[in-house]
Image: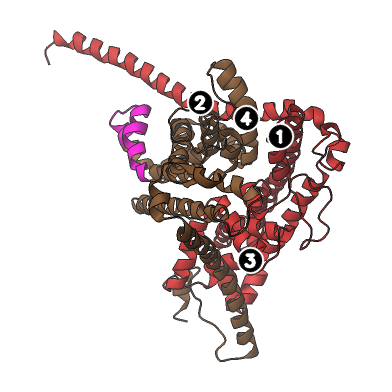
Amino acid sequence: MSVAEAPVARAVVRGSVRGARVREALFRAALLLCIGFAMLALAVLLADVAVDGLPVLSLDFLTSFPSQVFPERSGIQSALVGTLLLMVVCAVFIVPVGTATAIYLEEYADRDRWWNRLIEVNVQNLVAVPSIVYGILGLAFLVRGPLELGRVLLAGALTLGLLVLPVVIIVGREAIRAVPSSIREGSLALGATQWQTIWKQILPGALPGIATGVILALSRAIGETAPLIVVGAAAFARFNPNDLTNDPFSALPIQILAWVQAPQEEFRVLAAGAILVLLALLLVMNAGAIHLRNRYEQRW
Amino acid sequence: MAARPEAATAPGGPRPSLVRGRTRRSVGEHVIKGLLLAAAVLSVATTVGIVVSLLGETIEFFGQVSVGEYLLGTKWTPLSSGEQQSFGVIPLITGTLYLTALGLIVAVPLGLGSAIYLAEYASPRARRVIKPVLEILAGIPTIVLGYFALTFITPVVLQGIFGIDVQIFNALSAGLALGVLILPVVATLADDALRAVPEALREGAFGIGASRRQVVLRVVFPAALSGIVAALVLAASRAIGETVVVLVAGGASANLGIDPRESYQNMAAFIAQTARGDIAVRSVEFLTIFAVGTTLFVMTLILNAISIRFVRRFQQVYE
């Protein structure tokens, strides 16, 4: 490089450095805009629901039954009770079944056997099946068909349970896998059987993780609308479901949907109130999950 | 104890039983294993149940409506009566794809931008704020997004701010809400894919003088591409199967057009709409629920298979 060329070359480099800096800054700003949009969407959504729904919230709103005629006397008692019962029944179903499946896949299944690989791939696939299709399953097998339960809470709870079972299994497996194998081997070396090892050593260690998975699954279940529509949950239920296998039932998302689609403005406001109750319920559950994760998570 | 190291290297594999012979203890162990297997088989039974529940009625449906009319017909009015009744599913499928495309137009750039920022730019402290926001957004029930689309996006954003002359039920609001619904899916999964790219690749690129933007766009992004594609496919499959957002904000007409200001319906929303009405069991209207359900199930199954294939490829690269 000759002496005369050097300053020119330096100028070119400096210019391109400035251009590059601008491009870097613009790129970064564009990325920040993307994140900003996501945060803005959440903030506006919550603000919109809160502005519409807060004036409706009162003790009467929680304890009254929904009315199709008088919005001012309408409430969500049957829907809230329905959602809470759905959650309990669903938990009774998914906790043992989901945990058992996770234990089987992690502790017993020999991956060289085709049926074990089938179970694994199957769980993966079930996660991606649209929730409305689970509704069809519930309609065909639980409401009608072989079990013939009718449009009752048990059918709804089992449908939601089948829908969220893969979540429990996947999170449960991760929790079990996180228990170090030195604990397993120590227990086996002391003469414990495989089941004693699982029951006394592995499950206690994996419990916070499994519980987190169950809470996540339940919070997904109580927010689901589509399967309950197909299974036949009732909007505007005038009484609480006292019998899981006989009475019609309602649930918060179903009641919200009915109010959102009502033509009068007064009912839309009720939907916002019910949404706030549903979101509060989800918030409590997620806070519980985070608490569990932080408090009991073991470090090995 | 020759089997011990084997058990140590393969956690989760079969473990040698310490007790030989059929003592009472080993019988109990076998019973327990059987019970656990039974629970695991329930998940397979669920899939079988889905297929059986869809297929039986779908076959019955095609006994009354020809396959050609269903798959090739362009008029979808199964709930009308007499001459007006028509079972061409194409408007329902194009409606589904159209709404999904609108959702993807929103969610792909914004989700990928968020993922790149999270994975490559954000400080650990910023991550701790942004990640929970995405998790909360992902946990918002879809009925809430439907409410938001109908009572805010349409009247305030579309008609108010942008002055677009949309109908009450329109594809634009439903598509935007679908975009918000799948944005966290894209962002979270793409973030995972980007973070799985080994640090050495980034350092190598920095070492030869690349800027951060160049590293991200020319090295990290291409390296994570199959994971990112899997994320997008999964997000698309979420949008295709979404019911309530479309039911509330999209309206109830199967529309073959492309005007986003009009009302559109997708397959899942049609199923929900029809299942809610009072229709006689075993009538052809009732059977459409299952025929459309099968169509939707097959579409998401294909997408999921594609996504799993991409994930496998992406996992193999750096292991």
Q: Is residue A167 visible?
A: no
In the rendering, at what x and y percent does residue A14 appear?
A: 29, 13
Q: Which mark is residue B261?
A: 2
Callout 2: residue from which chain? B
| Residue B217 lies within the magenta run | yes
Q: Pointer 1 and pointer 2: residues touching (CB < 8 Å)?
A: no
Mark 1, residue position: A262
Q: Which mark is residue B150?
A: 4
Mark 3, residue position: A97
What residue lies at 72% left-to-right and 61% top-to-bottom? Answer: A154
Identified by mark 1, the residue type is Ala
- Tag 1 and tag 3 share a subunit: yes
Mark nearest the camera among 1 and 3 is 1
In the rendering, at what x and y percent does residue A120 appear?
A: 48, 64
Mark nearest the camera among 4 and 1 is 1
- The quadrant in which the C terminus of chain B is found is bottom left
Callout 3: residue from which chain? A
Q: Tell which residue pokes out farthest to the front in this image.
A: B83
Looking at the image, tell me whether mark 1 or mark 3 is earlier in sequence order: 3
